[in-house]
Image (spheres, rainbow, N blue to C red):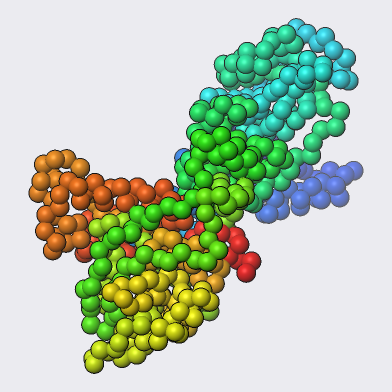
Amino acid sequence: MKEAMPVLTVGAGLHETLALLTSQLRPDANHKEDMVFLKDVFSERSLGYLMKIHEKLRQYERQNPTPVLHSASSLAENVAEELQTGPMSSEEKELLHLLTSPHLKAVLSVHDTVAQKNFDPVLPPLPDDFEDELDEESVKIVRLVKNKEPLGATIRRDEATGAVIVARIMRGGAADRSGLVHVGDELREVNGVSVIHKRPDEISQLLSQSQGSITLKIIPAIKEEDRLRESKVYMRALFDYTPLEDKATPCQEAGLPFKRGDILQVVTQDDPTWWQAKRVGDSNLRAGLIPSKQFQERRLAYRMKMGTLPNPKSPKKSASEGCDKESQAIAGLRRSFRLSRKDRQGSSGEDSEIGESDFLTYEEVTRYQHRSSERPRLVVLIGSLGARINELKQRVIAENPHRYAVAVPHTTRPKKPHEKDGVEYHFVTKQQFDADALNNEFIEHGEYKENQYGTSIEAIRSVQAKNKMCIVDVQPEALKRLRTGEFKPYVIFVKPRIPESRRRRSAATSPGGGEHGRLTDEDLQEMRQSAVQIDQQYGHLVDRVLIKEDSASACAELRGILERLERDSFWVPLSWMRT
């Protein structure tokens, strides 16, 4: 009786097929050695495992998996930061430990790398009746798939030939991911529609309205640009930008809106006027157009020349001038003083020449994490009227004097019996004080009740030399002196929560705790104006804004910030790392 031959089912996998083939091999007198060899190969266990792996991968591929999000790492960082803003339960502490562990960070980083890869669907075949009016060797037919996203390319009309030319390719867009469209290519047709006699805005509308499969007929540039590797240049935006309000942009839809303080990854600076950039942490993979630093500075200089922009070097009254002299003290800590800073010799007036670098555009930054071998970062507090930042600083230091400290100020006033030199103040003569001031030894100094007071650079260094975090509260004008690679200051702008409705105003007391009685409408208005002025003049130098609801919550928030400064990474000016 003849043995029945096994039959493969439709759903049989590769490893089942391999097993079946192995079972069907029979010795043959003429090909005995070959059959033995094949049987040995097919019976190899590692080959069977490879077939199973291949089958599982194919099965997973057919499921068409798509990532839920492309920025798991950023989300994890945001969650971890949010958890640290207040008291944590045991479950929240465990979650924070997991989110900050190096292994999970690495897994999430790999996830984001894979999630950002593009898996385009299979393109349908070109239609049989697709007209080709050009020589096969000179034309290129490009089939792209785009959903609701823009194509990611801008076009222009060549003034000499009238041809429609690809002006730029947006990094991360559909055109860039395809690798088939390049700057300088001539566009002839879109989905079979000739664009030779159409205006650029008509062509842009035709491209934006096309969904799914889009077919382009292109004459390649004579010399195609090499695709550049993505840049690792990061910039902190020092101004707000809205492309839809910018009449100079070559394509408003391709612009990238951003706010002051946003971190931008500049992926290409090929165009000296318009850079391409992405916002760090943004899930959108396509780059957008932003004005280059040089272009933004030039047009700001032009606006100032035309009188529509104030001179950035004009003397401005400090918003904190006139702030009440805080005199409350905590045992073992120095008294605070609020001083109007004397003008430096050689300071510029309204007639000083303005350089393009004086305008606020971008600041190149990099990631920095404090190392135990380095001196702690300087923490600088600035505050608007009513913030009472000295009280906030003293309270946090008093809770942990072994970890935090103030810079002991200098004064020319006589020492009181209970005071010690170098503890409450450094007591010096007026001649010595004037000499130090002339040598720019003070970050700020001034006169109060006919006595001189000042905080010196050396006083800050003395605190840091003890491996303590130095906390200073200064007037905003002192920030420029402190923003150096030596101190790497973290600037916190403290402003009180100001009631807005009349009902709340009528019952409002001083935001610092209520010891100064009820506030009038004029007081509240001055406090608002003070906060607005500081934000306008110095907001670009601020790392964190702390809204002070009350002393207890403000202290808790400040403690959380100080703790994160020692363990987390932060964006800092690149120039600090080069010094």
Q: Residue at x 46, y 53 (%)?
A: 315
Looking at the rendering, which quadrant does residue 183 occupy? top right
Is 347 in front, or is 483? 347
**In-image side of 102 versus 544 (left or right):** right
Is 424 in front, or is 200? 424
From what the image shows, is residue 440 above or below residue 36? below
Residue 409 spot, x, y in % from top left:
37, 79
Residue 184 spot, x, y in % from top left:
78, 28
**In-image side of 119 versus 98 (left or right):** right
**In-image side of 241 versus 563 (left or right):** right
Q: Is residue 522 visible?
A: yes
Q: Residue at x 71, y 12 (%)?
A: 195
Q: Quadrant of the C terminus?
A: bottom right
Is 160 in front, or is 334? 334
Q: Quadrant of the N terminus?
A: top right
Residue 358 spot, x, y in % from top left:
57, 51
